[in-house]
Amino acid sequence: RGSVHFDNVEFAYDPKRPILKGVSFDVPAGKTVAIVGPSGAGKSTLSRLLFRFYDIQSGSISIDGQDIRDVTQESLRSAIGMVPQDTVLFNDTIAYNIRYGRISATEAEMRNAAELAQIGPFIESLPEGYNAMVGERGLKLSGGEKQRVAIARTILKAPPILILDEATSALDSATEHEIQSALDVVSRNRTTLVIAHRLSTIIGADEIIVLKDGVIAERGTHLMLLTKN
Ligand code: ADP
Ligand code: ADP
């Protein structure tokens, strides 16, 4: 469940400047595909198109064989989970932030998600625990702690499709390494589109696609690309 198919997708924000000039690739259900390429190549645009934030000019995008134009944006949002580069938390409790969109989740489910995201012990060490306020007027969490809250939220949501958009690039390398293992947990057996600018962070991807000037310049496994370049 959750296979993604981009078929000859063409897209431009401004008709005079095409961003994607016919991009085709598949993310088979449960597999991980990484999109790499220079800044401005259109990597984040691909993920916005999957959410149908914009309409493509030509080609098609489908999930499990169904064209996303025939799917409501609401059901796309529930099918796709996203861990962004910089997580902005709501000015509310940690519990609210983890449960967001899943308010019916039980206490045990929430704690289990926090455990898998490797932030459970940290939250329990806080005087107010899961009821601690975060955000502007609450606790100031580090970048890594915020990412772990976002990962816990995604684990609880359990979407069939996951987008990791430079999810570790705002972190120092020690924190990046720790967060990577939490991301491995959430992406395991889940259709995953990883957007990254460093090859070193996508060792486990099943396929790597190099996007350049609006087209796929290269594609292959991690090893193939390392030996070629
Ligand atoms: P990447 O993620 O590879 O860095 P993006 O997908 O963010 O690239 O952006 C691709 C190109 O589209 C860039 O040249 C960027 O300036 C442009 N772009 C991104 N978002 C918008 C927008 N909302 N309106 C107009 N141009 C945009
Ligand atoms: P498969 O389903 O093919 O076994 P997984 O989904 O288990 O693959 O894991 C894919 C790999 O993608 C992980 O091992 C991890 O190294 C990599 N990965 C996951 N998330 C990120 C990320 N945000 N940045 C870089 N690499 C990631």
Image (cartoon, helix red, strand yellow):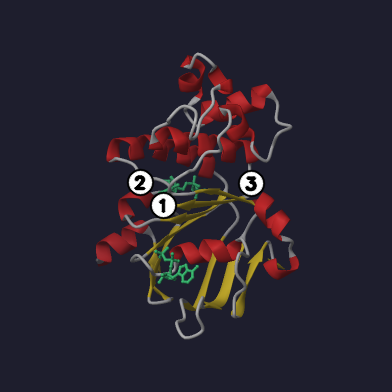
Q: Are marks 2 and 3 in contact (CB under 8 Å)?
A: no
Marks 3 and 1, how far apart at CA: 19 Å
The quarter of the image holding the C terminus is bottom left
Residue 170 tag number = 2
Secondary-structure class at tag 2: loop
Q: Secondary structure at mark 1?
A: loop
Question: Quick check: is the Cβ at mark 1 less than 8 Å away from ligand 2?
Answer: yes
Name the one closer to the observer, 111 or 66.
111
Going from the N terminus, do you reach mark 3 or mark 1 first?
A: 3
Instruction: Give the Cα separation between the discs numbered 2 and 3.
Output: 24 Å
Residue density around tag 2, few if under 14, some if 14–19, many if 20 or more, within 10 Å: some
Q: Judge whether residue 1 can be spotted in this image.
A: no
* Residue at the (75%, 68%) spot, across then down: 70
Q: Is tag 2's residue or tag 3's residue first in the polypeptide sequence?
A: 3
Q: Which mark is residue 195?
A: none
In the picture as drawn, the residue positioned furthest to the front comes out as: 137
* Residue 184 image position (x, y, % from top left): 46, 41
Residue at horizontal 68%, vertical 57%? 76
Residue 196 in view of the camera = yes
Q: Between tags 1 and 2, which lies in front?
A: 2
C-alpha gap between disc 1 and disc 2? 8 Å
Circle 3 or circle 1, nearest the eye = 1
Residue that badge 1 annotates = 166
Residue 64 screen position, x and y as percent: 68, 61
| Residues tagged 1 and 2 counted as in contact (Cβ below 8 A) | yes
Task: Point out the frontmost of discs 2 and 3.
Answer: 2
